[in-house]
Image (cartoon, rainbow, N blue to C red):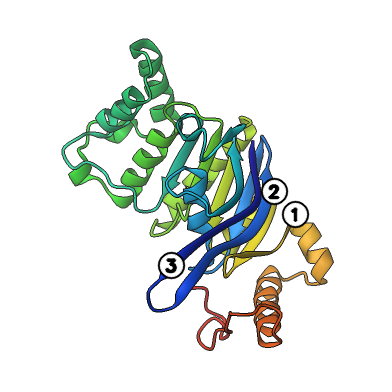
Amino acid sequence: MIHVQHLTKTYEDLQRGRFVAVDGISFTVRKGEIFGLLGPNGAGKTTVLRILSTVLAPTEGIATVAGYDVVRDSAEVRRHIGFVSNNTAIYDRMTAWEMVEYFGRLHGMKASRLKLRLENLFEQLRMNDFRDVPGAKMSTGMKQKVSIARAMIHDPPVLVFDEATLGLDVLVARNLLGVIRSLREDGKCLIFSTHIMSEVERLCDRIAIMYRGKILDNGTLEELRGRHREDDFEELFFGLLSQHEQEIRDGRYPGESPLSGELAGGQLA
C-alpha cells in the first residue's frame, strides 16, 4: 500500500547552506499492518509523512500510496489517505457532527452514504455525547477525536498518525491506540509516527528508527532486539543513535557534525 524508495528532501538554508531533512530512505507498509516511525524531534518523520500526503514534494526518490505516485497522482493519493496530527485546527463555530460531515462532502460523498458513515464513526469513536458541541467548547480529547473522524470519513485504505497522542491525557491516548488497533484489524495500512517508545512497542508490527533524516534500522521488535543483542528497547534505541553519532565523528557522513547536547544525555525532545 505504501512504497518509498530512496526518498530525499533537501532545503536551501541561507545560513547553513543545503540542509538534508530526509536522506535517501526506503521502506514499505503493507495492508493490515501498523508501521512505526520512531525518532527524536527533528529526525525527519513529519517531513516523510508530509511527502506521503502530498503536502511536500520530494527532492529525489519515489513514493507511492495505494499504487499512486505522490507527485504525478497527488489528487488520487489524497482520495486514498487520511492524515491525523496533534495540531489539526478545529472550527470554533461548527459542531463535531457538522465538521466531519463537511469533510465528507469535500470528498464528494453522497448524502445517504455520508449519513450512514457519520453514524458508524460517531459510534465507533464514542463521539455521540458531544456531537452537537461546537469546537470552541471542546476539550483536547474531543478535538482529537474529531480530527480522527474527519480523516476517516471517506474510509481511506491508508491512514497516517503523526504524533497523534501528543498532549492527550492517558485515557484519551489509550482510547486512540485502541482505535488504531481496530483499523489494523479492518485491513487498513497505517503509519504511526511518534517519539514515545512504549507506544511503538505496544502497537507496531514493524518499526523504523529515524535519526537525522536517515533510517538507522527497521524490522519487527524481535528482529531489532536480535540484531542488536539488546532486550531493553530504550537502550537499543539510544545505542543506535550513539553509534550513528560516532560514525559521524569518524568521518562516515561528511558534512554532518555530531550532537553535543541533550540527546547524548538521553533526552528525546
> Which class describes the residues within 10 Å of circle 2: few (<14), some (14-19), or many (20+)?
some
Q: Quadrant of residue 216?
A: bottom right
Q: Residue at x 68, y 77 (%)?
A: 244
Picture disc at residue 205: 2
- Outermost residue on the left side: it is 93
Alpha-carbon distance for marks 3 and 1?
35 Å
Image location (x, y in percent) of residue 37: 59, 56
- Between 100 and 256, which is closer to the camera in this rendering? 256
Q: Tell me: residue 217, above or below residue 67.
A: below
The mark that comes first in sequence, 2 or 3, is 3
Residue type at tag 1: Thr
> Which class describes the residues within 10 Å of circle 1: few (<14), some (14-19), or many (20+)?
some
Q: Under tag 3, what secondary structure?
A: strand
Residue type at tag 2: Asp
The mark that comes first in sequence, 3 or 1, is 3
Q: Are marks 1 and 2 in contact (CB under 8 Å)?
A: yes
The mark that comes first in sequence, 1 or 2, is 2
Image location (x, y in percent) of residue 131: 28, 31
Residue under pointer 1: 220
